[in-house]
Image (cartoon, rainbow, N blue to C red):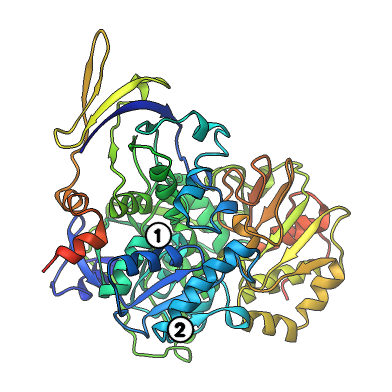
Amino acid sequence: MGMTITEKILAAHTDLEEVHPGMLINARVDIALGHDVTAPIAIAEFKKSGGRKVFDRGRVVLVADHFTPNKDIKSAQQVKIMRDFAREHKLAHYYEGGKAGVCHVLLPEQGIVLPGDLIIGADSHTCTYGALGAFATGVGSTDLAAAMLTGELWFRVPETIKIVLTGKLNKWVGGKDLILAIIGRIGVDGATYQAMEFTGETVGDLSMADRFTMANMVIEAGAKNGIFAPDAVTEEYVKYRAERDYTFYFPDPDAHYARVLEIDVSQIEPQVAFPHLPSHVKGLSRVGSVKIDQVFIGSCTNGRMEDLRLAAGILKGREVAPYVRLVVIPTTPEIYRTALAEGLFDIFLAAGAVIGPPTCGPCLGGHMGILADGERAVATTNRNFVGRMGHPGSEVYLANPAVAAASAVLGRIAGPDEIKGAHKL
Amino acid sequence: MKYTGKIWKFGDHVNTDLIIPARYINSSDPDFLAAHCMEDADPDFVKKLRPGDIIVAGENFGCGSSREHAPIAIKAAGIAGVVARSFARIFYRSAFNMGLPIFEARDLYDLVRDGDIIEVDGNAGTITIPGQEPRQLKIEPIPPFMQELIAAGGLLAYLKKRP
């Protein structure tokens, strides 16, 4: 029987010829990732079990990105556990301070995660790397401890949902809108335990940034992983970044899918997810008048160079509405520097934005842009649960960077077409 | 794997931000996390709780972040276990990996109210609702591999015992 991409990558990381949904396997891990929230628990478990050495100092990656630069004593203590561990085990990839970025943007950018890899991370958005044609999934801290120790982890081989994208993308519609529309259709548990494989003619038109955004949010439908078959766009992205060899896997023509979902992207307008679930999605034309207090552009979902350029094209020569805070966070040092060199900082600052250092920060209500009771934010992030960005009485609306920027200018949820002369930079 | 306790009911999609808000995950101390368990759903939850109580919930319990702080907070708060219609997958594996016994039961939710007592028997695969007319429901048995994990005392203990 044929295999899906997910099944092929999993099989390639075992001694088995084939794997099929439902099988419980032990698989070799190429990269194991932890960050300042999840790694300290993993490190404690690692030590408790008598661990002396990590399985490979080049394949355990630790990134201080959530509450960094350290926001308080407690978070500083957590980061200290991580840096001491990184130093003790001479980890090749430890990122903190001016080297750190939001892990799910940083690892692909630095060529640490590659097509064909099996990647586990103690962070639910680890699924982002599926955009490269890798199997990547979020796990807990105890799982990370086991992987750091043995280089292996147990998996139940997931069924795959095939999502076929056809048609031309509308103006201002990107990966964020496609994935929100899909989550809106199948629900926040519509793909629980399953893999989501994106395919179809539209995929070739999607940039790596779009694909990262889509794979990033498959967890919001409960999926184990999201995956794109690699192509020329993938090759172009990885060829100068890769630190080691990589493999392109493709699905077999007779692969078995649990279900097939066909999406005509030409029917999709920019999407907004209303509080308090990512599946509470409305097309922009049906949003109505929703006044806002804050806009956040950043995060592992939409904090890449393409996202910042999109926002800057709308903000250029404009100011944010009175009493609206705009927080922009470039997600890695490289993106920060590029945005500065391209003059985007001038545009953001002139518009009245605050520009933060690379961090997850406000996305999870960590720091650098917390909401008060009753405040509303439009965010380019991935979750809008109760209290996600601050007070349990606050509200988060998820949108793409163009909608976020337009909303900042108008002080209510709005589309870029409402702003005269808005264009893509 | 048996436990009997008073239940606390929560709805569908109880997410990790609700179980333990991010403002508290700058610490991984179980007692600190336990003190804030489910705080945004019910600020007095921890005060009202007795050790051995059980959480009963709807679909997709534990969705959202991978933070193991969530099952840690629940376990450290003294909750004996969670019975839900379904679980999000990272929460599901973390709960077993760290030794919090959880069960999927599709029908329990509509049959019980806050404060009811239930008996969960993971070995027999049953939940009993005592009373004048006791009822017994079947639950999905724990997969054999998960049973081995629990018997060993969690994933790392299991790995240690493995040849």
The disc placed on residue A87 is 2
- Name which residue type carries label 2: Arg
Q: Quadrant of residue A404?
A: bottom right
The percent position of residue A407, horizontal first and vertical second, equals 76, 55
Which chain letter goes with mark 1?
A
Which residue corresponds to the image point at 17% horizontal and 58% vertical from the top-left? A23
Where disc 1 sits, the SS reads strand
Q: Quadrant of the C terminus of chain A?
A: bottom right
Left or right: where B110 falls relative to A351: left
Where disc 2 sits, the SS reads helix
Q: Quadrant of the N terminus of chain A?
A: bottom left
Image position of A241 with respect to A134: above or below = below
The residue pinned by badge 1 equals A164
The percent position of residue B116, horizontal first and vertical second, equals 36, 20
Image position of A120 with respect to B121: above or below = below
Q: Is residue A239 something that shows in the picture?
A: yes
The percent position of residue A421, horizontal first and vertical second, equals 82, 66
Q: Quadrant of residue A395?
A: top right
Image position of A210 with respect to A337: above or below = above
Q: Answer few, some or many: residues within 10 Å of disc 2's Cα (few below 14, many 20 plus, some between 14 and 19).
A: few
Is A276 in front, or is B151? B151
Q: CA distance from mark 2 to mark 1?
A: 46 Å
Left or right: where A40 falls relative to A329: left
Q: Contact (CB < 8 A) between labels 2 and 1? A: no
Left or right: where A17 falls relative to B61: left
The disc placed on residue A19 is none
Which residue corresponds to the image point at 25% horizontal and 69% vertical from the top-left? A10
Q: Quadrant of residue A422?
A: bottom right
